Amino acid sequence: MGKIISVFNQKGGVGKTTTVVNLSAALSKKKQKILVVDLDPQANTTSAIFEDKEKNIYDLLINDEVLFYPTRNKNIDIIPSSNELAGAEIELSTRDNWQYLLKNILDQIKENYDYIIIDAPPSLGVLSMIALTSSDSIIIPVQSEYYALEGVGQLMNTITMVKDNFNPNLKIEGVLLCMYDARTKLSSNVKKEVVEFFGDLVYQTDIPRNIRLAEAPSFGMDIFEYDKFSRGARAYSKLAKEFLSRNR
C-alpha cells in the first residue's frame, strides 16, 4: 500500500511546493507510482504539473468524490487544487469527523500507489490538520536562512496534538534543508543548528539555491523537464535515492 507523506511547514517560502513537485518527479524516474495531493489553496503544485480540471480537491472534501487525474508523467497522478479551497475551511470544520475526510478517500486508493505526497498549506489551520491526520509521516522543508527554526516549536506542538488526538502513528519522515549555499557560513551554521535539533532525521542531501528550480514552475515543468542537468535536478535525484533507501 502507498505510504502517505505530507510535506509541511507552516512558514511559507521554504521550498515546500518545489519539494513536492520535484521529489515526486525524481521518484517517478525511479519507477515509483506517485499520487500528488495538492491541498494548498494557492494551487502552485497543480499549476506546475497539471492543466486545471473543472473538479478538484474541493469536490473531494465537500462531496466525498473519489477523483484523481493522470498527468503527462505516466507515473504521477494528481488530485488538483484551486483557489476556491481557501474558503472551504469553515465549511469543512462544521462537518462530523472533518479531520478524516481526506484519509477516508485516500484509504480507498492508496494500494494503487507506492507513495502519496500531500502538499499541505503553509498554515496551522483545518486543511493542515486534515493533511496530517491522513499521513503516515511528514517531510519538513527548512529554509537555510536565519530564523530557520522559528516556529518549529509550534509546528512540533501541532504534530504532537495530531498524534494525541487523531493519528497516533504519525512520524517525521525527514527534515530537508532547502536553498542551501555551501559557500556561505550562514548555511553551514543553519545546518548545524537544524541537525542539533532534529538529529538523524535531517536528510544528508541538501537542496541548493538554484535559479533553474525557481524558473521551472513558470513554464509548467518540473526540474527534470526544464533542465535535467541542473544542480537542482541532481539534488532532487539524490534526495529520491536517499528517501528510497530510508524506506527499504
Image: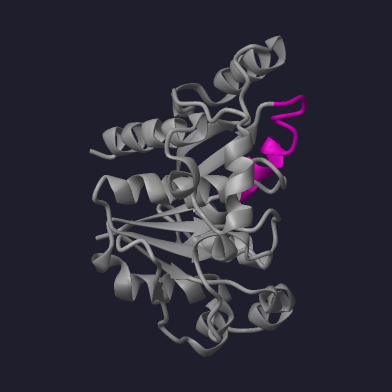
| Front position in the image: 243 or 210 | 210
Return the x and y of residue 248 as percentages of the image width and height. Answer: 22, 38
Q: Is residue 166 at all visible to an observer of this figure?
A: no
Return the x and y of residue 244 as percentages of the image width and height. Answer: 29, 38
Figure coloring: one colour
Return the x and y of residue 191 as percentages of the image width and height. Answer: 60, 19
Q: Residue lying farthest bottom?
A: 63
| Front position in the image: 24 or 155 | 24
Q: Residue at 55% of width from left, 20% of height from top?
A: 195
Q: Is residue 50 at all visible to an observer of this figure?
A: yes
Q: Residue at 63% of width from left, 50% of height from top?
A: 158
Query: Vertical placement of 40 versus 149: above or below?
Result: below
Return the x and y of residue 86 as percentages of the image width and height. Answer: 72, 73
The magenta segment? 145-159
71 left or right of 85?
left
Q: Residue at 57% of width from left, 47% of height from top?
A: 18
Query: Vertical placement of 130 versus 192: above or below?
Result: below
| Front position in the image: 229 or 205 | 229
11 left or right of 8?
right
How many marks on residues?
0
Residue 24 included in the magenta stretch of the image: no
Q: Residue at 31% of width from left, 73% of height from top?
A: 109
Location of the N terminus by quadrant is bottom left
90 left or right of 139?
right
Quadrant of residue 171 in the image? top left
